[in-house]
Image: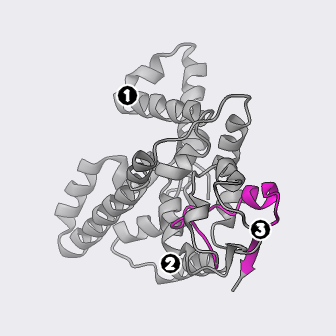
Amino acid sequence: MNSPRNPLSDGAGIVEYIFYFLAQGVFPFLLIGILVLILLLTNRFFCGWICPIGLIQDITAALPTQKRTLKMETHQKLLKIKYVIIIFLVIVTISLGISKAIDETFYLSYKESLGGLGDKPLAYFSLSEFLFVILPQLLVQIWLTAGLQPLFENVFILILFLFYVAILVLSVWYPRVYCRYLCPFGAVSSAVSDYSFVKLSRSPVRCVGRRECGICEDVCPKQIRILDEPYEFFTGEGECNLCMKCKEKCPHSAISVKLG
């Protein structure tokens, strides 16, 4: 699934497959069903505990620096970026699929105009694609040519390289910055989070509130306003990764896992 030789996916997994088939004019009912089922059963457990991109950002965030938070208004606006990316990809892939069904000649011309986006829709929006496919290929070319020329041959690749390096640097001070604002899978999983079987809840009896404590919000890597969320369960509008840091650090044991 993560092999650069795979014509279907270069590292974005099941979401990449879904967009690939949409671009081919095939509606992937089974894949969408599997994805929704996994998210309903596990919520964003994958994001918090399995995703290698999340792990890399956790490692950079572990560096001894003063962590920063964005103004809530700015944070809320930036959260919308990943949804814009998903909407854009849906429009592009579905239009590709429709054009293939109607006019093969126009489809081929349209696909060619999109470049790599036509074959691998998520490629340029995926940090995993950059780290595990594009960057290794680039490093091999640099090694073979014994110079940095391959980095500057393609302006788009250079911009992509600088952009994702900047994202990784920012993650030192802003934990999970890519997950928060750019991850396409995060956008998809956020939409299902409130309906998932696994969530976190907060005890109205044990929780003493923001004025006397607020530790849960301080340790949250996604800058979720936990104390503004309902007691019954909270997902931070789908942003909660179930990392359990709030549960672990709460001195009053007010946060627990809610099943069902």
Residue 20 x/y as whole percent: 42, 64
Residue 183 x/y as whole percent: 50, 53
Q: Residue at x 66, y 48 (%)?
A: 218
Residue 254 is labelled as: 3
Vertical position of residue 141 compared to residue 29: above or below: above
Amino acid type of the residue tagged 3 in the rendering? Ala
Q: 49 and 138: which one is in front? A: 49
> Seen from this angle, which residue lies furthest bottom?
260
- How crowded pointer 3 is (Cα within 10 Å; few <14, some 14-19, many 20+) is rated as some
* Residue 251 within the magenta-colored segment of the rendering: yes
User: From which residue to which does the magenta span run?
Assistant: 232-258
Vertical position of residue 167 compared to residue 74: above or below: above
Residue 120: quarter of image:
bottom left
Residue 32 is labelled as: 2
Residue 92 x/y as whole percent: 29, 61
Vertical position of residue 128 compared to residue 237: above or below: above
Marks 3 and 2 sit apart, C-alpha to C-alpha, by 36 Å
Name the chief secondary structure element in magenta: loop
Question: Closer to the camera: disc 3 or disc 2?
Answer: 3
Q: Secondary structure at mark 1?
A: loop
Amino acid type of the residue tagged 1 in the rendering? Asn
> Seen from this angle, which residue lies furthest front?
212
Instruction: Report if residue 8 is visible in the image.
Output: no
Question: In the visual, does 125 lie left or right of 41?
Answer: left
Q: To which residue does mark 1 refer?
A: 154
Vertical position of residue 18 compared to residue 139: above or below: below
Query: In the rendered structure, which disc, 3 or 2, sits on the residue that comes first in sequence?
Result: 2
Question: In the visual, does 100 lie left or right of 67?
Answer: left
